[in-house]
Image (cartoon, coloured by chain):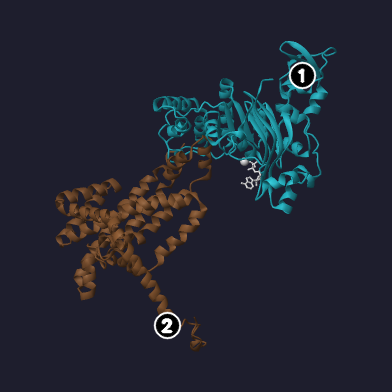
Chain colours: A brown, B cyan
């Protein structure tokens, strides 16, 4: 297994060249077999998701732009209750349209919304599960660490081998990157709920369900929401990487700009991503703050 | 004497990795410090026996760490005992299945906490509603009930405030209303007033005593403050290092402290105000002379009566009948501060 002839003070024991090549071949080969065997089944499994994603994108594009602006303004209002925020949001999207980035922006919104929705739908239950058992937490935390630190290009390879190029593999890549914060913060939020309040719930005879939904989740909500916010930010930051494997949106022109050295194109689309990120961040943060209103004292006696 | 509501029998609680294996050692006389040093287990409660009468107020007293919270949490089984039995209305609490236990907590025993333990995300009225909602009472009726109790503890107008907007005293009123709203017969109060300022604490004691006059619940009241204990409780049990070292009426405890620890406890109270003539008198009225004094009169008032009438002794009466006599010397001896029972290094702090 070790090629002793190469061993020196500057070269630690190294595998023989042939062995190493065989090992890599073995891994590649078996994964290729696996994807031949199950690739199609997986694709079928994800087909509804693909339909949904494409449908949402078409819906956003088919929506008349004035209506879209109203909806975006409404979203900003619901989140922040601030007219400044609403005006800023509408202005931002008008500029985006004026600079001819409307279509790509809608595609990006579609994938970020779907990714965020799925991250919430999967991440919150996993976080709750982790909070209920130290064993589950110990098993999942290292997985989350890997998901957050492994370079995204590395997991793009197997995803593309399995599912090819397209929206679904892109979505999966985005989710792998964006789901850890919501899982972590849901787990943390529930674990940080005051022991004494939980004891009170027990003393009044709350069942496990009543304890979870009536006490733990409401009190963890500010943390859970911080997780949602981070998940949105991280899925936006994956837009460029995802465009490498065929996800439409603002990442595509950025990628083109990088390869062709188009400064203006890259700058405009990059700034559009930043603008959307800032809007989502501000709106969701002020929403999160409002969730915590009850924590403030004020006219106490 | 009324019937027994809560009966605790040979209760042991040991914290640690293998508590069951330690019970026999503790029964064999291993002390709390030795159990900790030699076996790394904490002795929470040791051989507790206590009968609490229905409609009575039982005070449990002891210094911090003596096991008060542990004991009260056994009554509604928030803590499982290592050995022993607990009966409520003759029913074995430890034999209850989870379902049954939940109903017991919902309908039969409610609790008030030292740090209030209110639900911070719910308004005041919703907090009071909490227990009632869990009981499954329908919305309208539950709201009526909660509103009634909120008004009863003097918080009308604060329904829509959040707990964080209220002072400590008001928060504990919410805690009390929440516990009362379930209509449970048993009220467990773990140092419910200890976190409050002295004046507010006295207020809350008044609120509780008023309510108890009307409701006649079985109350288990924990405190580390003897003045509070004497004010609230008919019976007082004193815990030290998990052991119950004395149990009796307030008068008993002041006049016959079981050991140095209890003597220490009663050091600083105002004996003249707390002690009653009836607990110090001679039970023979035949040779008595002087003014008549009701047996429940506090010493300080009785002394004033004697001083006014320039008498050396008094006749003690109870419900119009002469039941004993008491002399000035007896009274003065009773209110004199007792000698400290133990050498300084043996005193407990
Ligand atoms: N979960 C626990 N694990 C270990 N020791 C405990 C635990 N709970 C209480 N104890 C110990 O039991 C003793 C009694 O505690 P507690 O009932 O809280 O006292 P009190 O309420 O009188 O201050 C203390 O020595 C405390 O350290
Ligand atoms: Mg305590």
Pinpoint the chain carrying mark 1.
B
Q: Mark 1 points at which residue?
A: B306
Q: In the image, what residue occupies the spot 72% across and 10% down?
A: B320
Q: Say if labels 2 and 1 share a chain.
A: no
Q: In the image, what residue occupies the spot 51% across and 41% down?
A: A197
* Above or below, B69 relative to A236: above
Q: Is residue A267 visible?
A: no
Q: Mark 2 points at which residue?
A: A18
Q: Are marks 2 and 1 in contact (CB under 8 Å)?
A: no
User: In the current view of this chain or complex, which residue is farthest to the right?
Assistant: B287
Q: In which quarter of the image is residue A295?
A: top left
For label 2, the crowd category at 10 Å Cα-Cα, with few meaning under 14, some 14 to 19 and many 20 or more, is: few
Q: Is residue B48 visible?
A: yes
Pinpoint the chain carrying mark 2.
A
Q: In the image, what residue occupies the spot 39% across and 44% down?
A: A293
The answer to whether the residue bearing label 1 lies less than 8 angstroms from the nearest atom of ligand 1 is: no
Image-quarter location of ligand 2: top right
* Above or below, A17 relative to B75: below
User: Where is the N terminus of chain B found, in terms of image quarters?
Assistant: top right
Rendered location of residue B10, percent (x, y): 71, 35
- Decide which of A182, A276 is in the foreground and name it: A182
Rendered location of residue A144, percent (x, y): 43, 60
For label 1, the crowd category at 10 Å Cα-Cα, with few meaning under 14, some 14 to 19 and many 20 or more, is: some
Q: Is residue B271 left or right of residue A49?
A: right
Q: Is residue B111 left or right of residue A236?
A: right
Secondary structure type for disc 2 = helix
- Decide which of B345, A120 is in the foreground and name it: A120
């Amino acid at each position: 297994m070790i090629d002793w002839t190469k061993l020196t003070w500057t070269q630690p024991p190294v595998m023989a060249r042939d062995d190493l090549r065989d090992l890599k071949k073995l891994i590649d080969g078996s994964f290729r077999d696996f994807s031949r065997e199950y690739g199609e089944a997986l694709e079928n499994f994800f087909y509804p998701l693909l339909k949904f994603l494409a449908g949402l994108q078409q819906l956003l594009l088919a929506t008349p732009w004035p209506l879209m602006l109203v909806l975006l303004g409404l979203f900003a209002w619901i989140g922040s209750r601030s007219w400044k925020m609403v005006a800023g949001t509408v202005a931002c999207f008008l500029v985006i349209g004026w600079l001819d980035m409307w279509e790509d922006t809608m595609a990006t919104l579609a994938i970020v919304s779907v990714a965020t929705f799925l991250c919430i739908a999967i991440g919150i239950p996993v976080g709750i599960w982790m909070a209920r058992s130290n064993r589950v937490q110990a098993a999942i935390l290292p997985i989350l660490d890997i998901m957050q630190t492994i370079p995204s290009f590395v997991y793009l390879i197997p995803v593309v081998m399995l599912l090819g190029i397209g929206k679904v593999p892109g979505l999966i890549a985005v989710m792998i990157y964006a789901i850890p914060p919501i899982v972590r913060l849901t787990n943390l939020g529930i674990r940080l709920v005051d022991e004494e309040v939980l004891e009170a719930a027990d003393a009044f005879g709350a069942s496990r369900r009543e304890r979870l939904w009536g006490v733990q989740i409401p009190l963890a909500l500010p943390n859970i929401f911080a997780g949602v916010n981070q998940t949105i930010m991280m899925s936006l930051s994956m837009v460029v990487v995802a465009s490498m494997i065929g996800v439409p949106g603002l990442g595509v022109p950025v990628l083109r700009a990088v390869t062709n050295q188009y400064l203006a194109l890259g700058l405009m689309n990059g700034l559009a991503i930043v603008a959307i990120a800032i809007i989502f961040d501000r709106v969701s943060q002020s929403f999160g703050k409002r969730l915590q209103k009850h924590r403030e004292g004020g006219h106490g006696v | 004497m009324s019937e027994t509501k809560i009966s605790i029998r040979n209760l042991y609680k040991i914290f640690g990795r293998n508590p069951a294996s330690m019970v026999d050692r503790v029964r064999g006389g291993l002390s709390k410090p030795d159990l900790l040093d030699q076996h790394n287990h904490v002795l929470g409660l040791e051989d507790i026996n206590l009968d609490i009468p229905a409609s009575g107020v039982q005070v449990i007293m002891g210094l911090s760490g003596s096991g008060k919270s542990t004991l009260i949490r056994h009554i509604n089984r928030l803590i499982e005992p290592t050995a022993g039995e607990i009966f409520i209305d003759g029913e074995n609490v430890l034999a209850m299945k989870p379902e049954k236990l939940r109903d017991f907590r919902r309908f039969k025993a409610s609790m008030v906490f030292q740090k209030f333990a209110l639900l911070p995300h719910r308004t005041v009225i919703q907090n009071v509603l909490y227990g009632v909602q869990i009981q499954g009472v329908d919305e309208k009726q539950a709201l009526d009930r909660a509103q009634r109790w909120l008004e009863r503890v003097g918080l009308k107008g604060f329904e829509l405030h959040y707990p964080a907007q209220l002072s400590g005293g008001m928060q504990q009123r919410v805690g009390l209303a929440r516990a009362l709203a379930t209509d449970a017969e048993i009220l467990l109060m773990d140092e419910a007033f200890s976190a409050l300022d002295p004046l507010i604490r006295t207020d809350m004691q008044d609120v509780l005593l008023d309510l108890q006059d009307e409701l006649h619940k079985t109350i288990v009241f924990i405190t580390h403050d003897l003045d509070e204990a004497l004010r609230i409780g008919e019976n007082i049990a004193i815990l030290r290092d998990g052991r119950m070292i004395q149990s009796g009426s307030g008068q008993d405890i002041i006049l016959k402290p079981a050991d140095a620890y209890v003597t220490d406890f009663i050091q600083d109270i105002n004996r003249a105000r707390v002690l009653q003539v009836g607990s110090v008198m001679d039970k023979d009225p035949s040779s008595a002379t002087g003014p008549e004094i009701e047996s429940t009169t506090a010493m300080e008032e009785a002394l004033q009566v004697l001083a006014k009438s320039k008498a050396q002794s008094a006749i003690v009466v109870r419900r119009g009948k002469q039941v004993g006599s008491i002399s000035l010397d007896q009274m003065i001896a009773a209110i004199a501060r007792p000698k400290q029972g133990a050498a300084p290094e043996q005193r407990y702090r």
